[in-house]
Amino acid sequence: MSTRPRRRRVGVAGVVLVLLVTLFGLLVGRLGQLQLVQGPDLARAAVTVNTRTVTEHALRGRVLDRTGAPFVDSSFDTVVTVERSVLVGSDDGGRDLVTRVASALGLPFEQLWGKTMLCGTSGAPPAPACFNGSPFVPIPVAAGVDARRALTLLEQPEKFPGVGVTTEPVRAYPRPHGALAAHLLGWVARAGADDVSESRGSIDAEDVVGRSGLEAQYDRVLRGTNGSTVVAIDPRGIVTDTVGSTPPVAGRDLVTHLDARLQARTEAALVRAVASARAQKLRADTGAAVVLDVTNGAVVAAASYPSYDPSAFSGGISRADLARLTDERGGTPLRSRLTAETFPPASTFKVISVPAAVNAGARLDGTYDCSPAVSVGGRVFNNFESRGYGPIDLHRALVVSCDTVFYRLAYAAWLEQGGLAAPVTVADPFVSMARSFGLGRRTGVDLPGEAAGRVPDRAWKEQYWLATKDETCRRASTGYPEVARTDKARAAYLGRLAAENCSAGYQYRAGDAVNFSIGQGDTAVTILQMAGVYAAIANGGTLWQPQVAAAYRTPGGETTAVAPKRVATVPLRSDVLAYVRSALADVTRPGGSAGTAFTGFPQDRYPLAGKTGTGEVFGKQATAWFAGYGPTTKPRYAVVVVVGQGGSGSKVAAPAVRQIFDAILALGL
């Protein structure tokens, strides 16, 4: 009996031993499988789970004038940060620490506390009060703080554990020589969801992108290439180590053709022109000025009115400020009158009408009747800028800006084409010449949002009628009761016009042709287009694409030039070109329509040429224009100024052009 229990014990022990050996073998096998078979995959998974990539943002390039003076620079804001691990490890979530930091900086607690929360998480305030950045970097709780106050935090690490001080690049606008150039430079803002998704990884939510002007046009040049840092994190999401990094590549600087000194004086001349018009009880609500190098299309200076300060967008613009800058009642300061606004060119267009009339059969040595008025198609058209001068030549017609001479020339050409019976496709010498000078299409300037303008030929008239016929006919029936409440005469006129256009608005009438010949009616141009027209007359017929950018420059100084772009050659006979130039030179002298504005200018050493324009706009005050170039002996610059609702071109725009040429001379450009 004593041997049986012993055998049982031995049997049980053997079974246990076998089980242990088996389990150990399975464990060893599993470990071998994990190490040898699945090891690489698990290692990659471990890295994926326990690391995060943090973007290192590239420093944005500067925008410089032709001499290297910065219009846009990158300055640095002082930023106070707090380590996320300190907040997570605190019993109160870091409230006491943030309270002490806020008190030391003299800032509200709520402002800093909101920044500790990631945008979109529970309890976080709406952007921009929350933190719209990576959860794996120190939290920037306060930006733009006083540097001396911020550094005192670093001197007391026991009181402010986990608190750091760093800098963050922001766009700065030094205003060299007082020049702002807001509508040329543009502004930047934080990237949106579309920017991020369309960038294929080159932009993240913390980047800024150009929204207008050169900042938008050359965003890729200025932005540079972001770098990255791979960090290790623990299960709480707290960074524990840096695994590796790729440094960012700073954006390139954009060197422009702009001269900051002339830019400042051009802006000042435009503001004075507006003030002059308002002193004459005119609204003068918009305006623009351009200085163009006629030899290559370089934009040397350009201003738009009203203007704004692009620094308002640094760090994020408030809703109130954005509403003010986009308010039509305040002139919509964000809107560029250089590219997005069109005006009737008025008599500045006559430099196009002279060669067009010659192409239609008019003689350069002919004599034409400058009567006070002319009847065309049953309607009387009057001289607007000048009085009647009797029989004169085309030279004199340009110098005194006689409308009736051009009315008769255009009417004769319209009849020759077939009048009302002419097909839409008939060749029109006035339309053809306008298009050859670049009107009716974008100039291609390196600024976004450019308008194409309008050349209202027969085809346009028909298309416009088809697009508006229903509304026109409705108005012919109902009239304009809302207008009649304040102006019965205007309401009656609009009603008659609607009735006429309802049935025959597609017709290109004699009135359309004669209005077109003096830049009126439905004709619409940008100031850059007219600068191109006068540059082409000055340089012998070459249309250049207006270009603001001159070159790109790396942080190391390597420069890549932006080549000028020749667009076309205007088909001008040499004798006609010389004739027009001669007449324009007399416009700025005694007896010319702008003679008074240029009294005292040193024409003997720097002779100027140009043309006034006073555009009629239905329901508004007249548009003031002057377009000119100089010196006529060796043309270098075309200068154009326009003031919407500014009245007389000779009294408002011409003096501004004179001031800009004064600046060109004084600066030795």
Image: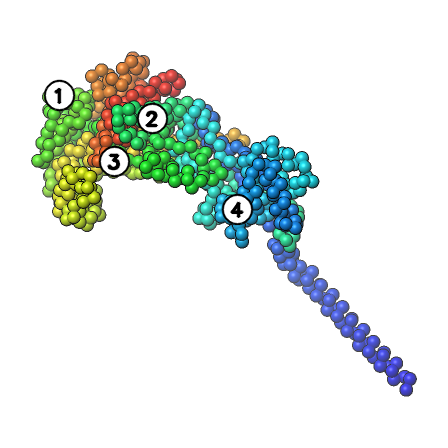
Q: Quadrant of residue 499?
A: top left
Mark 1 residue type: Tyr
Disc 1 secondary structure class: loop
Disc 2 secondary structure class: helix
Separation (CA) of disc 2 from disc 1: 33 Å
Query: At x 51% / y 48%, what residue is drawn?
Result: 125
The image position of residue 166, as x and y in percent, is 59, 37
Query: At x 85% / y 78%, what residue is drawn?
Result: 10
What residue is disc 1 on?
Answer: 389
What residue is disc 2 on?
Answer: 270
Q: Quadrant of residue 590?
A: top left
Give the side of residue 134 with respect to residue 395, left or right.
right
What residue is disc 4 on?
Answer: 130
- CB under 8 Å between discs 1 and 3: no
Disc number lying in front (3 or 2): 2
Q: Residues within 10 Å of mark 3 (few under 14, many from 20)?
A: many
What residue is disc 3 on?
Answer: 524
Give the side of residue 613 with respect to residue 302, left or right.
left
